[in-house]
Structure formats: structure tokens, C-alpha cells
């Protein structure tokens, strides 16, 4: 039993991978990209990760997106990381050393910074091998946020058409593209999409294949807030490891070690049991050094260390003397040159040089020359003595105090030597004590372990209970009930027959069971419903956008051309099965000049009539 328990304890220890992203190679465009017709480029512009690839026509459209990178960039300084230009995505390597420099074009899930968005697009087009000169001669399918603000779409259209010169573009919602990829072909279906990403969670009702935008709801919580909450929990639990508990490691715990409890309160009760805790706690091993600070040394090792430190100090002092001697020699040469001007009778140049040296008379110059000459000679003598001292090898086992008076050290040398006074003590014990091995009072490996217990379910729970982090928002279950209550009973039954889960924050184990439990509690007795998880919650948005691009490549009713962009503005959108609803900007109608001139007369007449009535 003890052996089994020890094996179980070892099995629950997980080292942090601390994965470092490798720079993306510059890829060549696929064979379909060089065909007679331009091949669409599919860009899933996510706030956590951007994905880009080609939508090649044919029976085999190609593998997963060729390019996947974090949607962040950092502007490097001169000489840092090989250049002063901005670094994007996987070119950053590890994010933690640059965390304070990272910038994102997104405000939550909406791109608002045009300059940073341009850097991400440049990176995508360059590494995908776009070969057209002066422009990107490919149609582009781009994802956008649910109910995307018109300003954001206008900014993106302006960037694509004016900067990159693309022929046409189509916008769509990532979760609707994922829904499109997972539904049967040519089937117009209704359903309820629950999409949870890095910054937000959306619940989207779909009626007869089109988005019902009026009843969409957003919860401002996602994977980013869960990572920050988990970091805060573990930093409060382990204040001695504040610096080691980084956001990147918290994201690793969320992705690989967390799960969603089907019943949160009941699961917390299970964790109160010591056996359950021991069997299910995950011990995350932080990196550490096995060297002990208090290790004991023998007298020979101590003496050798003293000698090494003494040699290092003497070499440092000798280097300082040589630098000071070089500076004094340069000043002396300069003064001797000025004295030669006086001897040669070049009085104008002499007086000019004397003013530059801030001196008043030739006597003052001669005094400085004598002082510098004596200082240079003394420095040369000290250097010779130091070289002789360095050649002497101390052989006695008894540490002796070096004759520092012969070196005539300066004030800086004396201060640096005083730091080493405890090492040069002349007192030695009469009897050498035996060397004893110091055993550590604790296990270093165990000290550098983070015990992740109830934190495994606390962090993902915030999208169901935002009050855990002090957010005054409704969770997924309450929002789901609120949306269903806005429809008739027949439409409710239709929607719950196809509850679709997508997004990276839906990949926790137990998420599907939790949604089914919540629906079972809110739906009428013996009513039916069906919950489906996307085949790949992270990449299905890109796959769906690729499938959509191939299906609608020749349909001009869904693509925005450059001519339409110039006529109708950057906020213009053509609706389709995976798009937002287009709501044009309605400007107030300006009153005509005739009505403006007639208004005062009408007003006076009206006032006169009212006055007559009062009379």
C-alpha cells in the first residue's frame, strides 16, 4: 500500500513545459495559389491566436492552417534580439521576458489599433509566401467579432483595400463559420451557439440558418480572465514563488490540468476528503537549482577559494592602475605638447591651448607636468610590484595576510579589500574540525511544487459564476435561460435541439456534461434537447471559413469589391449565412432652406393665434 501511495504521489507531479515558440519559416505558396484564378486567403483574426492559410479548390483543400501565431507584437530596442524592428507572434519566442512590452490590436475581441493590425497582416502575408508585386492579389475571408462596431469594420476595410490592394473581401463570425463546418452540407438549420474564447463568451441564436442579432448576448469573461484569476489564487497560496507563477504557466495549467465540475458545490465537498485530495491534486514542479547555499568546505578548499579571490582582487586592482596610468600618460603627453609650443615660440597657439586647459600661466603648466610625471612613475612602479606579487604562488596551508602596504592602494582599492577582510583572517583553529555533511531541513523539489487542487475547477467556473471574481454579470446558465425566454415555446424547442459548443474555452473536460445539466434544470419535465461539441473547437472556425470560401467563391452577392467599398464606405457588409447583420449608418435628414425661412413666420402666426385664443 505504501509503495502504491508513493507511486501515485510521483505520478501526480507534472513539470512545467514552458514551451517556447519557434519562429515561423517563410513558406512558399501552395500549388493551387499559382493557378489561373487567385486563390482565397482565409484569416481567422482571433484575439488570442491568429490563423492563416489558403483555401485551395479541389477534393483535397489542404491541411490545417499553415500559420498559427499569438496575436501580439512587441517593438524591440536597438540591438535587442537582432534588430530594432517590431517582433510579431512566434518570432517573440517566450512571452514572459517581454510581457511588459507586448501590445495587441484588440480591445477585448474587437480590433481597434490599425497600426498593430497591419503588423499582424504583414506577418501573415509574408510568411504565407504571397508573391504578387505591390499588392495582395487574392480574395480574403476574414473573421470579425459578433455585432462588430462599424468603425472597426471600416478601419479593416480601409487597411485591406487601400494598403494591400485586395480585389474583394468577405467578413464572417468565427463561431458561425465553426457551426457551418460542423453541420451537414446544404442543410438550413436552427440552433443555439455557445462560443467562449480568450476575452468573451457569446450565446448566439440561429433561426433558419441566419443569425438573430437582436437576441445575441455577450459575457465579458473568457480564458484571459480565468488565467488571471488562477494566477491570483496561486500567488496568494504560495507567496514565496510570486515571480515563478507567470501567466504563461497559468495558461498551461488551464489547458492541460483544469476541468469543469458537473456540480460545483458537490465537487468542492469531494475535495474536502483527504484521500480524494491526495489522489486528484496535481503537483506542478517549478524549476529549481539543487545546489545548497550552506554546503561545507574543507580547509584546503577554503584556502584555495581565498587564494582565487585574492588573485582576482589583485588582477582587478592592476587593471585599474593600468587604466589610470593610460589616462595620466595621455594627459602628460598633451601638456608636454603645449610646453613644446612655448619653447618653439608659437605664442598664439600656446595661449589658446592654455585657455583650453583652464590654466593661467606657464608656471602652472610646469607644476602640473611635474605632478603628472611623478604620478606616472609611481604607477609604473606599482604595476611592476603587482606583477611580481601575482607570480608568487602561495604553497603553505596556513592562510597568510598579504602585505598590502607595499602595494600602496588607493582609497577605492582599500574599500574593495575591506570587503574581503573576513577571508584573510590570521587566526586559525589549533585542531581542525572534521567535515560534516549538512542535510537539508526540507526537500527542495517539494518546496518548489505548486499543489493545484480545487484551483483546477475554480478558474473555469467563472464563466458560470462570474461573482467568484467580483463581476456583476450573469453566467452562461442565466444568460441561456434569458435568451430562451424571449422566444415562444415552439421556437425554444427548436433551438435546444441543436446547442452547439465552440471556442477554445469550451475544451475543458466536463464542459458538455455541465451544459447538459444546466439545460436539464431549466427545461420542462421530459423535454428533449441535444448538445454538440465542435470536432475541433479551436480550428473549426478556420476550417469553416475555408469551406465557405470554396462554396461561395463565384457568388458575387457575398463578396465586397473595391468598387463597392469606394461607393458605400468601409463599414459596408454583404450578409450571408455566417455574417453579422448589416446596420447602415443613418444620418439625420437636413432641413431644406425653404422650411428654415418659413419657420419663423409660422412660429409668429402660431403664437398670435394662441394669444388671440387666450384673449
Image: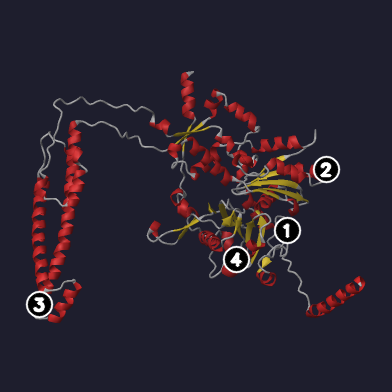
The answer to whether the residues at label 1 and label 4 have Cβ atoms under 8 Å apart is no
Q: Nearer the viewer, mark 2 or mark 4?
A: 2
Measure the alpha-carbon separation of dots 2 and 4: 44 Å
Can you give x and y, in whole percent of width and height, for residue 305 in the image? 20, 38
Residue 219 in sight: yes
For marks 2 and 4 on the same chain, the one whose residue lies earlier in the sequence: 4
Lower sequence index among marks 3 and 2? 3
Image quarter hosting the C terminus:
bottom right
* Numbered tag placed on residue 581 in the rendering: 1
C-alpha span from label 4 to label 3: 74 Å
Mark 3 → mark 1, Cα distance in angstroms = 91 Å
Q: Mark 4 points at which residue?
A: 160
The residue at which mark 2 appears reads as 489
Q: Residues within 10 Å of mark 2 (few under 14, many from 20)?
A: few
- Please tell me which of labels 1 and 2 falls first in the chain: 2
What residue is rendered at 59% in x and 35% in y?
457
**Helix, strand, or loop for circle 2?**
helix
Side (left or right) of 388 relative to 203: left
Q: In the rendered image, which residue does mark 3 sit on?
A: 342
| Tag shown at residue 241 | none
Q: Percent from the top left, x then y, of residue 5?
A: 48, 22
Q: Is label 3 or label 1 in front?
A: 3
Label 1 or label 4, whichever lies nearer to me, is 1
Secondary structure under the numbered disc 3 in the rendered image:
helix
In this view, the residue in front, 133 or 89, is: 89
Amino acid at each position: 500500500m505504501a509503495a502504491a501511495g508513493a507511486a501515485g504521489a510521483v505520478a501526480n507531479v507534472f513539470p512545467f513545459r514552458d514551451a517556447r515558440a519557434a519562429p515561423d519559416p517563410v513558406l512558399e505558396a501552395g500549388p493551387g495559389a499559382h493557378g489561373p484564378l487567385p486563390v482565397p486567403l482565409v484569416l481567422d483574426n482571433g484575439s488570442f491566436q491568429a490563423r492563416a492559410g489558403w483555401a485551395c479548390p479541389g477534393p483535397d483543400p489542404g491541411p490545417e492552417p499553415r500559420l498559427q501565431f499569438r496575436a501580439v507584437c512587441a517593438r524591440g530596442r536597438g540591438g535587442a534580439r537582432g534588430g530594432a524592428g517590431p517582433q510579431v507572434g512566434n518570432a517573440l519566442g517566450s512571452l514572459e521576458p517581454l510581457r511588459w512590452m507586448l501590445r495587441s490590436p484588440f480591445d477585448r475581441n474587437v480590433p481597434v489599433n490599425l497600426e498593430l493590425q497591419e503588423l499582424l497582416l504583414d506577418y501573415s502575408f509574408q510568411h504565407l509566401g504571397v508573391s504578387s508585386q505591390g499588392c495582395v492579389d487574392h480574395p480574403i475571408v476574414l473573421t470579425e467579432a459578433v455585432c462588430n462596431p462599424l468603425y472597426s469594420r471600416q478601419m479593416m476595410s480601409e487597411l485591406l483595400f487601400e494598403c494591400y490592394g485586395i480585389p474583394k473581401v468577405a467578413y464572417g463570425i468565427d463561431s458561425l463559420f465553426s457551426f457551418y463546418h460542423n453541420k451537414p452540407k446544404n442543410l438550413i438549420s436552427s440552433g443555439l451557439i455557445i462560443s467562449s474564447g480568450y476575452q468573451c463568451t457569446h450565446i448566439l441564436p440561429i433561426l433558419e440558418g441566419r443569425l438573430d442579432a437582436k437576441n445575441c448576448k455577450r459575457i465579458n469573461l473568457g480564458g484571459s480572465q480565468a488565467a488571471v484569476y488562477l494566477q491570483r489564487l496561486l500567488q496568494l497560496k504560495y507567496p514565496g514563488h510570486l515571480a515563478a507563477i507567470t501567466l504563461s504557466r497559468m495558461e498551461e495549467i488551464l489547458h492541460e490540468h483544469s476541468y469543469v465540475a458537473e456540480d460545483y458545490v458537490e465537487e468542492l465537498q469531494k475535495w474536502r476528503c483527504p484521500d480524494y485530495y491526495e489522489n486528484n491534486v496535481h503537483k506542478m514542479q517549478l524549476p529549481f537549482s539543487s545546489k545548497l547555499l550552506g554546503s561545507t568546505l574543507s580547509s584546503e578548499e577554503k584556502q584555495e577559494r581565498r587564494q582565487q579571490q585574492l588573485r582576482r582582487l589583485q588582477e582587478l586592482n592592476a587593471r585599474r592602475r593600468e587604466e589610470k596610468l593610460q589616462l595620466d600618460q595621455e594627459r602628460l603627453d598633451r601638456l608636454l605638447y603645449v610646453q613644446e609650443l612655448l619653447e618653439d615660440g608659437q605664442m598664439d597657439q600656446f595661449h589658446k591651448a592654455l585657455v583650453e586647459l583652464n590654466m593661467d600661466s606657464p608656471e602652472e603648466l610646469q607644476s602640473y607636468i611635474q605632478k603628472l610625471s611623478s604620478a606616472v612613475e609611481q604607477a609604473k612602479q606599482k604595476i611592476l610590484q603587482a606583477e611580481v606579487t601575482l607570480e608568487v604562488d602561495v604553497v603553505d596551508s596556513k592562510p597568510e595576510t598579504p602585505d598590502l602596504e607595499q602595494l600602496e592602494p588607493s582609497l577605492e582599492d582599500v574599500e574593495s579589500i575591506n570587503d574581503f577582510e573576513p577571508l584573510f583572517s590570521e587566526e586559525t583553529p589549533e585542531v581542525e574540525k572534521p567535515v560534516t555533511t549538512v542535510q537539508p531541513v526540507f526537500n527542495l523539489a517539494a518546496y518548489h511544487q505548486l499543489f493545484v487542487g480545487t484551483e483546477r475547477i475554480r478558474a473555469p467556473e467563472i464563466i458560470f459564476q462570474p461573482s467568484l471574481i467580483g463581476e456583476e454579470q450573469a453566467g452562461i446558465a442565466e444568460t441561456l435561460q434569458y435568451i430562451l425566454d424571449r422566444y415562444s415555446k415552439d421556437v425554444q424547442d427548436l433551438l435546444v435541439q441543436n446547442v452547439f459548443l465552440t471556442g477554445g474555452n469550451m475544451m475543458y473536460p466536463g464542459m458538455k456534461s455541465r451544459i447538459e445539466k444546466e439545460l436539464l434544470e431549466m427545461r420542462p419535465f421530459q423535454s428533449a434537447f441535444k448538445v454538440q461539441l465542435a470536432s475541433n473547437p479551436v480550428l473549426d472556425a478556420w476550417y469553416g471559413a475555408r469551406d465557405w470560401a470554396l462554396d461561395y467563391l463565384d457568388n458575387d452577392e457575398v463578396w465586397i469589391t473595391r468598387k463597392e467599398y469606394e461607393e458605400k464606405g468601409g463599414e459596408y457588409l454583404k450578409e450571408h449565412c455566417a455574417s453579422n447583420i448589416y446596420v447602415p449608418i443613418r444620418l439625420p435628414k437636413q432641413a431644406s432652406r425653404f422650411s428654415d425661412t418659413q419657420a419663423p413666420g409660422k412660429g409668429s402666426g402660431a403664437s398670435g393665434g394662441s394669444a388671440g385664443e387666450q384673449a
